[in-house]
Amino acid sequence: MRIVVNELHHTYPAGVEALRGISLVIEAGEQVAMVGQNGAGKTTLVKHFNGLLQPTQGSVHIGDWDTREHAVSQLAARVGYVFQNPDEQLFTKNVHDEVAFGPRNLGYSPERIERLVEDALALTELTDKKETNPYDLSSTWRKMVALASIISMDTPVVIFDEPTTGQDAANIARIANVVRVLRERGKTVITITHDIDFCAENFERIIALAQGRVLLDGPANDVLAEDELLATTYVDPPQLTRLGKRLGLPVTVRDEEQFLAAYREFIGTEK
Amino acid sequence: MAIVNLQDVTYKYPLTEEPAIRNIHLQVEEGEFVAIVGPNGAGKSTLCYTLSGFIPHFFKGELNGTVEIAGVETQKSSLDEWVLNVGLAFQNPFNQISGSKFTVYEEIAFGLENIGVPRGEMKARVEAAMAMTAISDLADRSPYSLSGGQQQRVALTSILVMEPKVLVLDEPTSQMDPIGTREVFQVIKEMSARGMTVILVEHKIEWIAEFADRVIALHNGEILLEGTPGEVLTSPLLPERGFGISRYTSVARTASGQGLWPGDRRLPITLQEAVDGFARDRK
């Protein structure tokens, strides 16, 4: 499902102009990471995708829907949103019910709900914890419950707000796997993140925001090459991108495989 | 002379069967900067609670062994004596904010009020601490109206203002952007340079590599490894046991297996070490 943002402005009631004219298109099935300093407008922008915020000027279309003409409850069938802090969205007495709540609200058939819940639990490695109270789980697993409760809604667009904050290596790998599976299923995945290494290793397109405007938007390697521009919105390129640049590799790299391939070629040409 | 001295410490939360930390021996010298790393569930936060006296004064359960800071044993002192020696910044700043104060300024003064610091001195200390962590402009805001990163700065400031001998920090920058993280690490480093003892739990390995004197790797409640950042953070045990490591270390390890990293060279933990190793190999 295509997302079209046209000349979007948003001014909060207190007078803060958080978005100052954003235009972009996200095609169905794209994987997009939004980066930029705190206050750049990342969360304000994506909250327009599920109708939590309405444009002050301009428009947002999710598929053929103008978000101004649809309620948040309708948009929930198209855009799923995983909050940064799982404790802001968990409230039922066991994991299974938590994950079933979204699809039930969307009015799916009981069979479809059960199938979606089982699938979301398996994908997030929670199947053996489905009878547990979410608050008896560690914060790591509560994060996975929050993911599962949105995945089970089977929306064409899924948004992850800071998915890796406070997570350890094993859980970051689980979250990366969820992103990969959703990509294979043709979902649009959008993440907001300060974790630039996670972003570089799992997302093909990066949008850098600064002061309510789009600073950079393009294929990950092209955006990450712009270290001076990124610095203006307090983004440091990934560790391996910085290493490649310091070594003088002729191409921008963003993960281990790209680094080693470029490095090997680089040594070869030097000899 | 060790300011922190833990001897064979084991602790079990109420109503649990397995200890959260066990057989911990730890000595920290005055002014040392020690980082603690480990996967979720390794016992890092429990160790922070033990150092800061919340165990056993707030969390009951079963504590064995001795926990001694500045010559005083935690079990033989009260929590209000203990807070003069040790300050803890919680992992989630929301749990730390008192809830009884309307402004950031009052929140930061709260600890000093409780120990009866005279008004003039209190004002000077609060303002100096707020300047240090760059939150002076938040003085009149409600602590609850702030972003997660700002709340973390307030939580840290409310500890720094107490001038504890030992500063215990549980992921103090988890909700901050890279620039906020850098600023806070600079503040911590400055406190350390002034002689404050720092014990820091952190997932952001790049910062530990740069600042810590010593790293302790905690796994399943026990100390798995202990040593300099270069020794601990490059150990092959870490990735095997679910620890996060720096991309510099992991790429050099892969490169080493392919003959692309000099065999006699320790794996890198910082950008500069990685540049030196890969550049040297090229010659």
Image: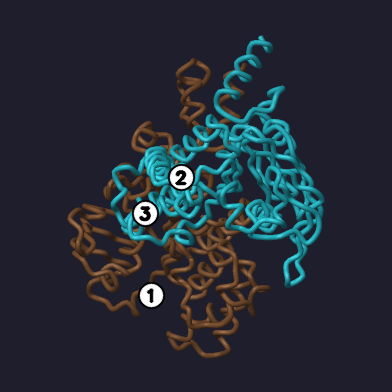
Chain colours: A cyan, B brown
Q: Earlier in the sequence, mark 2 or mark 3?
A: 3
Return the x and y of residue B38 as percentages of the image width and height: 37, 46
Query: Mark 1, chain letter?
Result: B
Query: A251 above or below A265?
Result: below
- In the picture of the structure, the residue carrying the numbered disc 2 is A152
Mark 2: give few (<14), some (14-19) or many (20+) Cα within 10 Å.
many
Q: CA distance from mark 2 to mark 3?
A: 11 Å
Q: Give residue A196's position: percent from left, percent from top.
A: 60, 42
> Which quadrant of the figure contains the C terminus of chain A?
top right
Depicted A62 relative to depicted B49: above or below:
above
The chain identifier of the residue carrying mark 2 reads: A
Please state the horizontal and vertical placement of residue A185, each as a whole percent of the image: 53, 32
Q: Could you tell me the amino acid type at mark 3?
A: Asp
Determine the chain carrying the residue at label 3: A
Disc 2 to disc 3: CB gap under 8 Å: no
- For disc 1, the marked residue is B83
Tell me the amino acid under the disc marked 1: Val
Instruction: Tell me: A175 left or right of A203.
Output: left
